[in-house]
């Protein structure tokens, strides 16, 4: 039996659509991969949202001078810049205080100039607004206070920097946080954006795409085999087991017929059919129900109570199944408002159960 034919058998056997199962398997596999294998570590990202010169006088203006620390900034060919950086956690887990390395605090280094002033100007949560702080170690190094940053939380810092007029200001992240391999820095002012998922999937030359097709196809086929192979194997084993059970039951019926009176054959035909369909344990359950007066009374009371309910709005219980089977097999029959046992049919069933118990054990 091939896998395809086995799958077709499964589809005929069960009440779900093969296409629906395929889609469920594909999207379930994606969800499983997303939950189990995706990166759940913190991701620290620096975003430069402002890098603006606030002092940029191109023409000489007589009598105009800007003094800082007893130095005329214009004559020294220096300028003042405002640098705003957003620090965010874009990962799937929080950054806790014990994640920070005290020997290498989180922060950044500027390539030139002198940091005059720095502060936190905004934050995504009141906690960060109150607790996020900056420390200016020297002219070029900034460190952040160790704070808890949950996923998708952030704070914005602003710095006033004095540097040379013709120097391009740049920032280099520093520090170590447990679980963070690298600190990403993005300059929003340059308009650079991260490539989309679709672009990443479709990027590459025509030869790259040609090579991808068989790889993806093989991967899909392998995934389907891994999904369906256990189902096919289990279904095949269950089928084999059921076939053997049916053969064994038919042999027991055939041998019982050859060792008993002919009258039992007629009486037991419905018993044989029930036995083939539900097995010996179900017959034993019927025997207990019909011979135990208290249990039979309980099943009758349940039947009477259920008769007044909307059949379409309730599920069949075990008592319903037992009572219906007793009626269908002729073990009990209705007489007026009550039910009467068919002792002859019960005796015939008991004889068969006794024989089957010996042969099945």
Image (cartoon, helix red, strand yellow):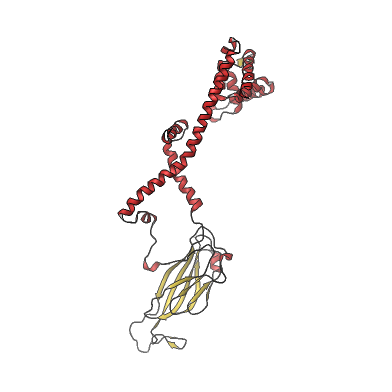
Observer able to see residue 154: yes
State the residue lying farthest toward the top: 262
Q: Which residue is drawn at 46% across and 35% down?
A: 16
Report the residue that reaches farthest toward the left: 206
In the depicted view, which residue is nearer to us: 349 or 223? 223
Percent position (x, y) of residue 227? Answer: 47, 42
Along the line of sight, which residue is nearer the eye, 302 or 287?
287
* Position in image of residue 171 (x %, y %): 44, 72
Look at the image and tell me in which quarter the C terminus lies.
top right
Return the residue nearer the eye: 79 or 259: 259
Horizontal side of residue 237 vs 198, given as left or right: right
* Residue 289 position (above or below residue 205): above
Left or right relative to 289: residue 109: left
Specify the quadrant that holds the N terminus.
top left
Image coords of residue 196 (percent x, y): 38, 57
Q: Residue at x 58, y 18 (%)?
A: 327
């Amino acid at each position: 039996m091939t896998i395809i034919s086995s799958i077709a058998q499964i589809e005929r056997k069960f009440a779900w659509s093969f296409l629906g199962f395929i889609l469920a398997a594909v999207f379930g596999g994606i969800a499983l991969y997303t939950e189990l294998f995706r990166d759940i570590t913190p991701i620290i990202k620096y975003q430069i949202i402002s890098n603006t010169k606030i002092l940029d006088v191109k023409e000489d203006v007589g009598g105009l001078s800007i003094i800082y620390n007893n130095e005329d900034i214009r004559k020294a060919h220096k300028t003042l810049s405002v640098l705003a950086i957003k620090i965010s956690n874009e990962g799937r887990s929080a950054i806790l205080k014990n994640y920070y390395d005290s020997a290498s605090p989180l922060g950044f280094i500027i390539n030139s100039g002198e940091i005059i002033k720095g502060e936190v100007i905004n934050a995504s949560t009141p906690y960060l607004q109150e607790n996020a702080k900056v420390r200016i170690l020297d002219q070029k190094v900034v460190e952040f206070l160790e704070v808890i940053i949950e996923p998708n939380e952030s704070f914005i810092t602003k710095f006033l920097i004095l540097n040379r007029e013709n120097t391009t200001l740049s920032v280099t992240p520093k520090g170590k946080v447990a679980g963070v391999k690298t600190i990403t820095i993005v300059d929003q002012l340059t308009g650079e954006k991260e490539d989309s998922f679709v672009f990443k999937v479709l990027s590459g030359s025509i030869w790259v795409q040609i090579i991808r097709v068989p790889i993806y196809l093989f991967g899909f086929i392998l995934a389907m085999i891994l999904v369906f192979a256990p189902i096919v194997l289990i279904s095949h084993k269950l089928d084999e087991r059921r076939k053997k059970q049916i053969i064994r039951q038919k042999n027991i019926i055939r041998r019982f017929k050859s060792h008993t009176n002919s009258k039992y054959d007629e009486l037991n035909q419905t018993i044989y059919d029930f036995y083939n369909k539900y097995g010996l344990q179900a017959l034993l359950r019927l025997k207990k129900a019909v011979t135990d007066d208290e249990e039979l009374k309980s099943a009758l009371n349940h039947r009477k109570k259920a008769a007044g309910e909307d059949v379409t709005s309730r599920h069949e219980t075990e008592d319903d199944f037992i009572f219906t089977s007793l009626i269908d097999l002729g073990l009990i029959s209705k007489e007026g408002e009550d039910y009467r046992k068919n002792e002859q049919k019960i005796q015939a069933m008991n004889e068969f159960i006794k024989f089957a118990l010996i042969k099945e054990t």
